[in-house]
Amino acid sequence: MEGRLGRTDAPTYLVWSIFNTACCCLPLGIAAIHYSNRVKEANSVGNGVEAEDASRMARNLNITGVVLGLIFTIIFIVYYVNAHKVG
């Protein structure tokens, strides 16, 4: 996304952070939303270094949250299937 004076703004990953909070991993999703908002604020004042750092942290938190969410879902499904076997 083009910002002021032709510079490129760092991505906020806000939509991904909200999805992560609702569907995957609440604590990491909330932290990712926090960092996404920091990206937005840093982009608005033109602080590219802080925006990039916060953007990287939001992305990493989201990746970790999705992976943990998938792992816990798989564990739950395996446990549920094994607990409800007939015979």
Image (spheres, rainbow, N blue to C red):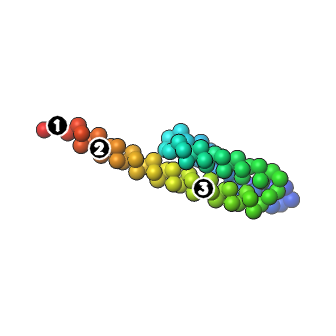
**Residue occupied by mark 1:** 86
> Label 1 near label 2: C-beta < 8 Å?
no
Identify residue type, mark 3: Arg
Which of the 4 image quadrants contains residue 52? Answer: bottom right
- Among numbered discs 3 and 2, the one appearing first in the sequence: 3
> Where is residue 8 shown, x and y percent of the image?
76, 60
Q: Which residue is located at x 56 percent, y 52 percent?
A: 62
User: In the image, 82: left or right of 24?
Assistant: left
In what element is the residue under mark 1? loop
- The residues tagged by marks 2 and 1 sit, at their Cα atoms, a distance apart of 14 Å
> Where is residue 37 shown, x and y percent of the image?
70, 47
Q: What quarter of the picture does the C terminus occupy?
A: top left
Of 16 and 54, nearer the camera is 54
In what element is the residue under mark 2? helix
The crowding category of the residue bearing disc 3, from other C-alpha atoms within 10 Å (few below 14, some 14 to 19, many at least 20), is many
Which of the 4 image quadrants contains residue 20? Answer: top right
**Residue occupied by mark 2:** 79
> Where is residue 3 shown, x and y percent of the image?
80, 55
- Among numbered discs 3 and 1, the one appearing first in the sequence: 3
> Where is residue 64 shown, x and y percent of the image?
51, 54
Q: Is residue 19 visible?
A: no
Identify residue type, mark 2: Tyr
- The residues tagged by marks 3 and 1 sit, at their Cα atoms, a distance apart of 43 Å
Identify residue type, mark 1: Val
User: In the image, 26: left or right of 54?
Assistant: left
**Residue occupied by mark 3:** 59
Q: What quarter of the picture does the N terminus occupy?
A: bottom right
User: In the image, 1: left or right of 68?
Assistant: right
How many marks on residues?
A: 3
Q: Which residue is located at x 62 percent, y 53 percent?
A: 58
Q: Which residue is located at x 64 percent, y 59 percent?
A: 56
* Residue that protrudes farthest toward the left in the picture: 87
